[in-house]
Amino acid sequence: MNYTFTAEERKDIIALMNREIVPAIGCTEPIAVALCVAKATETLGCRPERIEARLSANVLKNAMGVGIPGTGMTGLPIAMALGALVGRSEYELEVLKDADAKAVEEGKKMIEERRIDVDLKYNITEKLYIEIEVSAGGASALAIISGGHSRFVHVSRCGQTLFSLDAPATSEGEAPVAEVKDPELTLKRVWDFAMTAPLEELEFILEAKRLNMNAANMSLQGDYGHAIGKLFRAESERNIMGDTLHCQIVGMTTAACDARMAGAMIPVMSNSGSGNQGLTSTVPVVVYGEQTGASEEQMIRALILSHLTVIYIKQSLGRLSALCGCVVAATGSSCGITYLMGGGYQEVTFAVKNMIANLAGMICDGAKPSCAMKCASGVSTAVVSALMAMHSRCVKSVEGIIDDDVDKSIRNLTDIGRDAMTQTDAMILRIMTSK
């Protein structure tokens, strides 16, 4: 029996999706750092002479080896410099879209003059934490992002707090912005919403289709990262892997990831703070739907199911963890593909359990070009899991971490990724920073 959502409940879920599914240019960790620099610079009121970043380990890990859009460079210093030079906080995760060759050269000069420092923030539990202090002419400004890639929790200038989520009021005497409580979800509620909400309320998801498929197609025209996506389209490789729908799904998704991780100036639609999660939630579903003749309504509902499943799982996993985000995002796309194959809710639960049984434990060792390889693994498993589900084949509760209750199976996955893999996360960072 389907749950009947009130108009207000539908409005809350759509608002949640609109908060979590947003355009982004570049890997979201260094871009979030650039966003924080931009806000601090705007608060300072002039170009900073010095920029200092204090970051959580997970932010540092994801920002070390990834390309920064429009620069041909990797890492945080150039992202921070551009955040100060051309960044605009109103652009949020597209903060660097005004960057040009002149700004890059000025940014390189700031780096050469050692005006930028990056340090680890110690003694914090929040895994997504960015603290930026800028200074010039004896004045300074501080901006802090925490708990979300564009979630500012503090802004101050010369020691005077201008905004704080913890403050009872702003300096102007106005109440601070209230925290928005996310609607409570289960996989069944996700399914029911995707299947029953009025179509006109869901059409916003087509922008994710447009942006993310454009990223995949543009990547195939260039030579980005490890060019994994192009391997699936080259004639010699097709002789080995074939030109199947499965290979098309994997190839198009990894192509988009290739470009994004290499720092292409191509916007994508992110999910839960990650562009790769947005791509992996979208491209497999679209390719399968287009190749099998899905109607626009089926495509929309499949994409809503995919993206909202990812948001639901990330609610308990957290923004950043030691678990690779492709595990979560590919689980969403497996649900969408299962629906497009003609599956119902039971088949979708089978697909989720099959995904968790296979991919649990895939580590995140930072954002980088080889993330496309992990996307390939996740998306390939998504197709296999959907096919198994459509044949009523599902990993049983006597096997590993799978439970009869699909939501409990999801919690088992997220408990491992959020809590049990904490030491794994620390070891990964030690290895990465000691090379």
Image (spheres, helix red, strand yellow):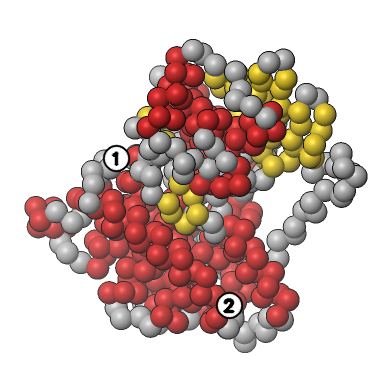
Q: Is residue 96 left or right of residue 186?
A: left
Toward the viewer: 283 or 361?
283
Toward the viewer: 226 or 75?
75
Q: Is residue 417 above or below residue 42?
A: below
Pointer 2 with pointer 1, Cβ within 8 A: no
Residue type highlighted by circle 1:
Gly
Toward the viewer: 15 or 433?
15
Q: Is residue 242 left or right of residue 186?
A: left
Q: Position of residue 178 (x, y in %)?
A: 80, 54
The tag on residue 210 is: none
Q: Which residue is mark 1?
A: 225
Q: Is residue 88 left or right of residue 356?
A: right
Q: In this view of the protein, can residue 293 be seen by the observer?
A: yes
Q: Image point 35% across, 61% down: which residue?
A: 213
Toward the viewer: 6 or 4?
6
Q: Which residue is mark 2?
A: 201
Quarter of the image with the C terminus is top left
Q: Image point 46% across, 75% down: which residue?
A: 300
When asked about the image quadrant of residue 187, the answer is bottom right
